[in-house]
Image (spheres, rainbow, N blue to C red):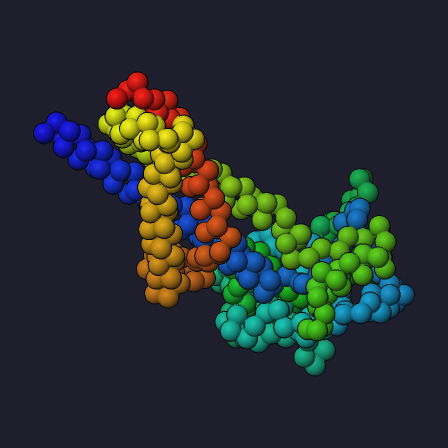
Amino acid sequence: MLSKRKKNFINVISIISILGVSFCTFALVVILSVFNGLEDLLRSLNNSFDPELKIVAAKGKSFVINDSLIARINSVPGVKITTEVIEDYAYVRYRDANQVVTIKGVSENFIDQKRIPRECIVEGTLRFKKDSVNYAVIGRGIQNTLSVAVTNPMFPLQLYYINNVKSGSLDPSKLYTRKNIIPGGVFSIVQNFDENYILVPLDFAKELLNYDNKRTSLEIKTAESFDVLNVQHDLKATLGGSFSVLNHEEQYKDLYRLLKMEKLFTFLAFTLLLGIGSINIFFSLMMLALDKKKDISILSAMGADQKLIRNIFLTEGALIASIGAIIGLILGGFFCWLQMTYGLISMGMQTSVIEGYPIKPEWRDFLTVLVVVSVITFLISYRPAFQASRFASVKNL
C-alpha cells in the first residue's frame, strides 16, 4: 500500500514537471515571437518614412554638396534616386499656437521615392510646389497641436530659425530668420514623426535655415533588382571615409540594440524560470531512484553497468522534458497563429497603428527553446542518474 502511494506521488510530480516545462516553453515561444513582431513593426514604420540608404557626414552636422558629388553617387550601380535633404529644428507659429518642430527640406524627387503612401496622407495632398507657391506637409500630431486648417490658405505657418550671430549685435532682425508657408497636406505614419516633422521644399529650407550649398544628408532609393547592402558597400567604397552610408537598421541602431537587449534579458529571465520549473524533474528522478533501488541492483546483477543505469535515468528525465517541451511548442505555435489570424490580444490603445499585438514566430526561436530545454534537462537529470548508478551493486539485493 505504501509503495503504491509512493508510485502515485512520483507520477504526480512527473505530471507537474511536464506541465511546468510546457508552460515555460509556451511562454518562451510567445515572448520571443512578440519581440520579433515588435521589431518587424518598428522596421516597417521607420521604413515608410526613412530612406533605404542615408548618406551623412562622418564628422559634423552637414557637408558641402556639388554636382560632382551627386554625379559620383548616381554613377554607383543600383542608385535610382538621390534626394537632397536639409534637416534642422525650428520654431513654428500658427495663429495663436506655437511649437518647436523638425524642418525637413527635400528636393522635388522626394515624392518619386514613394516613401509616404497615399493612405498615410489623411488630409490635403502630398505636394511641395504648385504654380511657384511653396507648400508644407505636416504631421498629424502637429496639426492637432496647432489646430491647423489645411483647407484655409488664409493662415500660413510662420517658421522661425535662430541664426548664429556674433555676440554684441543689437539688431533684432539678425537674430532669427522668418518665412511663411501654406500647409498643403497632413501625413500620419507613426507618433514620433507625426508630432515632430514638417516637410518643406528644399529651396525654402535652404533660405530659412541659411544652409546655402550645405546638406545634412542625401537619401538614396535603390533599384528593385539590386541588393541594398551591395549598393551600400559600393557607395562606401566610392565616397571614402568622409561620409557614412547608413542602412535602415543603422539609422536607428540604438533603438534596435535596445530592443535586442530587452529580448535577450527577457529570454534569460524565462530560461531561469524554466530551470526552476524543471527542479520537479530532479525530485521525481531522485525519488524514482530510491524507489527502484532493488530493481537497479537486479539489473546490475544481470550485467548492466553503471553507465547503462545512468543512461536509463537520463532518458527518463529527457522523456519528461521532451513531452513538456513538445506540448509547449505546439501550444505556443498555435497561440501565435491565433494572434496573427484573429488578433486575440489588442494593443489597448485607440491611436495604435495596428489593432492586434504584433507577433512573428520564427523557427530559430523554436529551435533555441528546444536546445535550452535539452541542456537544462541534462543538467537537472545528471545528479539523480549518477546517484542511481551508484545503486548498481549486487550488495543491494
Point out residue 134 in the picture as x, y percentages from the top left corner.
68, 72
Residue plotted at (68% across, 73% down): 224
Q: Residue at x 43, y 35 (%)?
A: 378
Determine the residue located farthest toward the right in the rendered image: 68
Residue 9 in which image quadrant: top left
> Is 244 on the left-hand or right-hand side of 159?
right
Q: Can you name the residue that lies furthest to the top here?
A: 395
Of 200 and 148, which appears nearest the observer? Answer: 200
Q: Position of residue 227 (x, y in %)?
A: 70, 66
Residue 109 pos. (x, y %)? 72, 73
Image quadrant containing the N terminus? top left
On the rendered image, what quadrant is the C terminus found in?
top left
Q: Position of residue 388 (x, y in %)?
A: 34, 26
In the rendered view, tell whether residue 240 sits above or below residue 147.
above
Along the line of sight, the residue nearer the viewer: 184 or 336: 336
User: What residue is at 44 percent from the left and 46 percent from the top?
Assistant: 370
The answer to whether residue 160 is visible is no
| Vertical order, 352 against 130 (above or below) | above
